[in-house]
Image (cartoon, grey):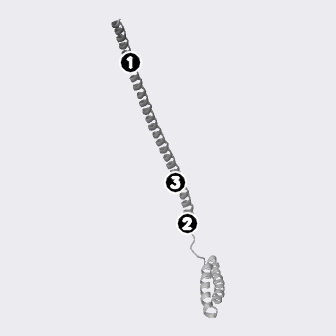
């Protein structure tokens, strides 16, 4: 009986060994699959990070291009405005260039004022008062003389 008992136990032990080996093999396979799944998940996460960083770089690049286009547009507007102003000022310059200078009335007033100030300082003891009075009187006399000269030139 002992031998039958031992044979039975040996068969049971062999069957158990087979089951243990099978369980170990399956556990190894499951663990290998889990680590492969983790690796795949990590790879997918890394890929997503790269895609996100590329998208962010693209959006930054687009924003920079848009701002550069905006600056170029503003610069173009400023240049057009300056060109318009230059054209206007050229027209005004042409109009002012046609003038020949001071009229005889203005020249006479300026010269009379200068001479009147000098004379007022020399004649009056109070230099400031003499300069003011002489300048006003000299400007009036000079302007009158210049106006007479202008009238005579127009008549000719």
> Which residue does the numbered mark 3 point to in the structure image?
75
Residue at the image position 39 percent from the left and 23 percent from the top: 28
Nearest to N terminus: mark 2 or mark 3:
3
Q: Residues within 10 Å of mark 1 (few under 14, many from 20)?
A: few
Check whether the beta carbons of the residues at disc 1 and disc 2 lie within 8 A of each other.
no
> Which residue does the numbered mark 2 point to in the structure image?
93
Nearest to N terminus: mark 1 or mark 3:
1
Check whether the beta carbons of the residues at disc 2 and disc 3 lie within 8 A of each other.
no
- Residue 53, percent from left and from top: 46, 40
Find the residue positioned furthest to the left.
Answer: 3
Q: Is residue 98 above or below residue 128?
A: above
Residue at the image position 52 percent from the left and 54 percent from the top: 75
Determine the image quadrant of residue 7.
Answer: top left
Query: Which callout, 1 or 2, points to the residue nearer the camera?
Result: 1
Determine the image quadrant of residue 34.
Answer: top left
- Residue 79, percent from left and from top: 52, 56
Residue at the image position 54 percent from the left and 61 percent from the top: 86
CA distance separating discs 2 and 3 = 26 Å
- Residue 63, percent from left and from top: 51, 45
Nearest to N terminus: mark 1 or mark 2:
1
Q: Is residue 5 above or below residue 81?
A: above
Check whether the beta carbons of the residues at disc 1 and disc 3 lie within 8 A of each other.
no
**Foreground: 68 or 123?**
68
Label 1: element kind: helix
Query: Which callout, 1 or 3, points to the residue nearer the camera?
Result: 1
Quadrant in which the N terminus is drawn: top left
Question: Which numbered disc covers residue 20?
Answer: 1
Question: Which numbered disc covers residue 139?
Answer: none
Label 2: element kind: helix
**Foreground: 134 or 149?**
134
- Residue 117, percent from left and from top: 61, 87
**Foreground: 153 or 90?**
90
């Amino acid at each position: 009986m002992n031998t039958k008992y031992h044979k039975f136990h040996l068969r049971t032990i062999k069957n158990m060994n087979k089951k243990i080996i099978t369980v170990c093999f399956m556990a190894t396979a499951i663990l290998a699959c889990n680590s492969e799944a983790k690796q795949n998940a990590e790879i997918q996460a890394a890929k997503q990070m790269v895609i996100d960083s590329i998208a962010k770089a693209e959006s930054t690049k687009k924003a920079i291009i848009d701002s550069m286009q905006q600056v170029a547009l503003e610069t173009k507007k400023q240049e057009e405005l300056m060109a318009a102003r230059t054209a206007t000022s050229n027209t005004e310059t042409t109009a002012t260039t046609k003038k020949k200078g001071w009229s005889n009335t203005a020249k006479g007033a300026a010269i009379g004022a200068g001479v009147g100030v000098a004379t007022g300082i020399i004649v009056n003891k109070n230099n400031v008062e003499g300069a003011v009075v002489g300048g006003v009187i000299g400007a009036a006399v000079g302007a009158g003389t210049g106006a007479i000269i202008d009238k005579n030139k127009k008549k000719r």
